Amino acid sequence: MFVSRSTRSNVLGAIFAGLIVVFFCLILLWHDPLLFWNDDHELSVLPVFADVARSWSEGHLPLLSPYSWVCGNLAGEFQYGTFSIFVNAAVILIWKFPLTFAQQAAALSITHLFVLAAGAFLLARGRNFSMPLSIFVALIAALNGWIICWGATDWFGALGAFAWLPWAWWAAERALDPSRSRWRFLWPAPFVYLVITGGFPYTVLMLAVLVAWLSAKSMWSRQVGKPRDRRDTQVPPTLLMLSGIALGAGLAAPAWLALLDYVHGSARATTASAAHWQWIVPWRALPGFLLPAWTVKWPDFSTRYLPHAATELACGLVAPAALIAGFIWRPRLVIRRMKWELLLLLFLLVLCMLPSAGVFRWSFRWLPFLHLVLALCAADVLQLRRRSPTGSASTVLLIVVTVAMSIFGTAGQYGAGVAFIYLQVAVIWAAAELFLPDWKFREWAPVVVTFVIFLATYQSIPSNCGVPKYNFAQELLSAAPLDPQRLYLSIYPPTEHTYRIEKKAGPVGQIVRPGSTSMWAGVRFVNGYSPILAAGVAREFGFAIHGEIDPDMGNYLLSDQSRMLEQLGVDGLIVAREIATNPTSPDWQLVFSNEEGRVFHWRGAPFPRVRSVSWIDSRPDQEFVTAIISRIVESRHRVELDVDVPAGGGSALLEFSRPYFRGYQGSLANQRLSVTSYRGLIPLMEVPPGSRGRLVLTYRPWWLVYGGGVSIFCAFIFVLGVVAAAVTGGSTRSTAASDGGSYNRRIF
């Protein structure tokens, strides 16, 4: 197939933009090899992805994990991109190499930053920006303060989803282009699918705002444009775009249906009202767009207003300076030319400064979208004024902000040093504009300055914004001294306060395994990192997000008053050194102790994974017969066993030592059996008297069945559309043709 020169140059330009971002990240890694190794990456993302890679190697879709009960439903957690082809492919490939934890985290983030930069470049090129300005947009989209400080180094789901938002935007604008064929509605589908399955609900909300904005803009332009011929039967572009968006949402149906099912009744559904006031961008911090060292009080995770440098607002200086200069230069032209983009920019800025609502906590998460729109607006101004003295404007604005910083005392810890570096760069840029007016590479100045400013910012201001770092050593890949055949409950104090490197500089976690770190070695734990906390054991035991149990519940379970742990199949206990209490039952035997904690095992062999019980406290008036169980075969989503229930008596009750989630189904010799739960903690199955044969418990939730069906149907429609477009050639008359009779041959 013939590929036009413009398409080839755009592809090469996108790759080049991505490689610039990769080069930038390698410089940062050379300065700090642990840059991408922070907080959630350590407690949650990397250990879970290690288990995802293990699951694929076992031939299983990573829906469930046997190595954590709290974080057992990987699909329902959503943030791990279970249904994203790209996320899974990246994980499988990266985990093939013998990398350290920090190197795996860096490879995962840099891969997605490359994708983000390439998509932003294509979005800019689709708006007819020059090659340098398109790279300028790509740098801001991929290297802005929020993406580097949070998405790439802490909340991977945010980066995994947002990496595809510029692609979805670019594809949606192609779907709105009437000069393309009727098959152009297919363009948004794969990218919408990748946004939704990427693993961040906030980005799905960003996509919804973007689609609404594009629809309103398209319909307004259609109404105020040339009068339509009544004989015109062309499908409205907005409808075509929405069809592609709907097709992409259908492709991602299992992901969002799983989230909706999992969030229902979870801890996330009852978020404390105080959380909606945390991490809001204060209006006093807005000068941080020009000088990120600007320090005012921000509300943190505990709703405390503490001094915080505005690193999240870092956008490379050029973009806000160019936009401000544009308003000073010719405000009416700027507003007339980009009124829709400016409305979107203002709307996003307001959202960043308002309290969050519902399950969408922390309004500053709108910032990456804001940075992308800001970059597009600035590029438009720079294209309008190719020889504008933007360097001089940047210098003047920096002087004003620096003076204000001195007057209002907002310099903080880094203000003086950062302001000095910024001013040096701006002055050099302004001097080049003044004394080298015909400088050959003048149009590349915004790219170079943005790159240098970003580099200076992250070299001068810590990029992790105060979130914890933990010294997790590679030894966590080994189960020792724990037993992989046992199920452990680990009782330890809050992770972010106890095990961060400021408190414990040496290696930690080999005993207590905080968060989801048990997944690295494949050790079965009740604990796990989960923002949603939907598992029954998470609510029953009062687990916190980072995997620690409620202290009062811990003391209650150690006293073994209800023998609940035995009922669940917990035959291992880990008690951190900071916890003075020990289990009181003589059946718990101390098997290991060091400066980190103590390990106790229930006497005898590990508990069987499936047990026949004669009585259970949730059904105290009922007694059951004991069934004979043999040949147990257990996998992630399925348990098979031979069962023999005596005839002439009552039924048998089987307990399965795995976390209960809605969606389990049971069968015996092609006969459906009901699956219930013990207090929402573990699956139970009642087997009729006289039953004999192969019993199967399988995880088959409704959202996987129906969502998978919708996804397969939409994939069939998409492939059919691509084939049809290729066969027909996608010929369409170009509305931009000046001679009235020329045609452009465009696929899609």
Image: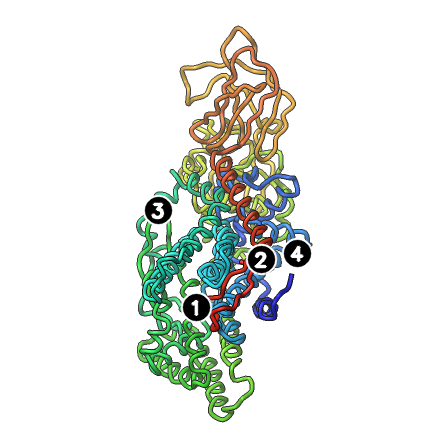
Mark with earlier residue (3, 2): 3
Q: In this view of the protein, which residue sits in the foreground, 133 or 102?
A: 133
Q: Let me know if residue 28 appears in the view.
A: no
Name the residue that disc number 2 marks: 729
Name the residue that disc number 1 marks: 311
Helix, strand, or loop for circle 2? loop
Name the residue that disc number 4 marks: 99
Name the residue that disc number 3 marks: 271
- Residue 335: percent from the left, percent from the top? 33, 74
**Distance in Å between CA atoms under marks 3 and 2:** 52 Å
**Distance in Å between CA atoms under marks 4 and 1:** 30 Å
Mark with earlier residue (1, 3): 3
Q: What amino acid type is highlighted by mark number 1? A: Thr
The nearer-to-camera label among 3 and 2 is 2
**Distance in Å between CA atoms under marks 1 and 3:** 27 Å
CB of mark 1 within 8 Å of CB of mark 3? no
In the figure, 40 relative to 64: above or below? below
Q: What amino acid type is highlighted by mark number 3? A: Thr
What residue is at 58 percent from the left and 35 percent from the top?
636
> How dense is the environment of label 4, judged by Cα within 10 Å: few (below 14), some, or many (20 and up)?
few
- Residue 606: percent from the left, percent from the top? 60, 29
Tell me if 440 is positioned left or right of 617 in this view: right
Q: What amino acid type is highlighted by mark number 2? A: Gly
> How dense is the environment of label 2, judged by Cα within 10 Å: few (below 14), some, or many (20 and up)?
some
In the figure, 724 relative to 383: above or below? above
Spot the residue most to the bottom: 435
What residue is at 52 percent from the left and 84 percent from the top?
442
The nearer-to-camera label among 4 and 2 is 2
Helix, strand, or loop for circle 1? helix
Mark with earlier residue (3, 4): 4
**Distance in Å between CA atoms under marks 4 and 2:** 46 Å
Q: What amino acid type is highlighted by mark number 4? A: Leu
